[in-house]
Amino acid sequence: MPQSTGPDRRRGFRIAAAAVAAASVALAGCSSSSEGSDAGGTAAARAATAVGDTSKWPQTVADQGLVKGLTLPLQPYMQTYQDAMVIERAARTLQTECMADYGFTVVFPPVGVNPPPNADDSNMPRRYGISDRAAAAKYGYQLPPDAAEHPAPLNLSPAATAVLTGRKGTDPRAEPAPPTYNGRKIPEGGCQQQAFDELGARIDFTLPSRLDHDSLVKSQEDPRVRPVIGAWSTCMKGKGYTVADPFAAVDMAFRNGAGAADQKQITLALADIDCKKETNLIAVWHKVDAEIQSRQVEQNQLALEQLKDRNVKAVKAAEAALRG
């Protein structure tokens, strides 16, 4: 699937721990659970802390292409993929221990085996359209092919599912399960929600996400950016493409479907990036974008700092939990 990059379609990776709490099991999968004593529960908890290949994780600061080294003022108030995976590791450990208390042995797969293309909601690698010429020469507008080994589908008994999620299924929309198991009360939201609550990690990152989206839209329409987008469009016309802005180039690339990039798409992608370099579009756009975000941070300082503080505390609590 292509990754949309337009300002109203660009929503890249965004992870609030509250959302992870609702979806982590359904997305991650785990081994089949067993019922009985909690023998093996400690080993299962250790297994829950395993980590996938971190070299495949997105960088918190872009290290390739025309956006290399660029950051934005709102990024310190977003949760990074790295932060989210620390929290997820700790949550899985706590979930495994909680399940063992009810007589279930559940072994989760390593975290971080299916990383997103961007480390936070700024989506810097594709914020202003594609920006990495080396990647474009291979994949056009596509993301690199997914070569990760995905975890096996979730395989839990109905009873284990109820204890883990507090529902009759792993889908967050599944109906609530009975409130007890073998006469013992199940935590609200199951062991899953209890783990995130214990870490203080049920955090809503809607504010920085919304502000980030708004700054991209406003910066694109800024009178300092519009002429440079126009220059980019003129450059593209000189290469044989009639296209208004970089997001329209994405639409053009996928007009005939979203399969693997062919040479036609690759040629368009290379022209796109070359024109961005020739007109200095990304540098100009980023400067205006950053100015807008600086004002947003000033106007929302208290709420953003509180959010940042909660995230820092959640990560520290997760690290402490992993140390045991």
Image (cartoon, rainbow, N blue to C red):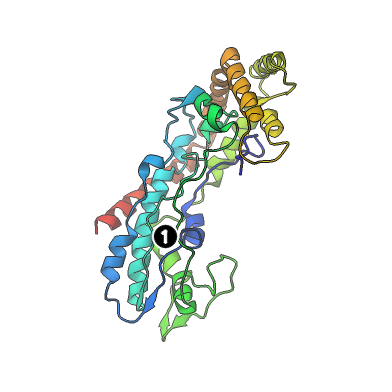
Q: In the rendered view, does 101 fall on the left or right side of 20? A: left
User: Percent x, y for residue 13?
Assistant: 53, 44
Where residue 107 appears, as percent x and y from the top left, is 36, 66
Question: In the picture, which quadrant includes the N terminus?
Answer: top right
* Residue 295 is at least partly visible in this image: no
Give amino acid for label 1. Answer: Phe
Q: Quadrant of residue 41?
A: bottom left
Give the answer, above or below, for where 88 lies relative to 221.
below
Give the farthest residue toward the left.
324
Q: Residue at x 64, y 41 (%)?
A: 259
Residue 150 left/right relative to 212: left
Spot occupied by residue 214 in the image (x, y as percentages of width and height): 62, 35
Residue at the spot 70% in from the left edge and 40% down from the top edge: 257
Residue farthest to the bottom, as pictured: 183
Q: Nearer the viewer, residue 129 or 300?
A: 129
* Along the viewing direction, whichever of 3 and 320 lies nearer the viewer: 3
Q: Secondary structure at mark 1?
A: helix
How many numbered marks, from 0 up?
1
- The answer to whether residue 122 is seen in the rendering is yes
| Rendered position, 303 above or below 283 | below
Label 1, residues with CA under 10 Å away: few <14, some 14-19, many ≥20:
many
- Quarter of image, res 267: top right
Give the quarter of the figure containing the C terminus.
bottom left
Q: Nearer the viewer, residue 219 or 116?
A: 116
- Residue 181: image location, x then y, percent: 43, 82
Q: Which residue is mark 1?
A: 196
Residue 32 position (above or below residue 88):
below
Outermost residue on the front side: it is 263
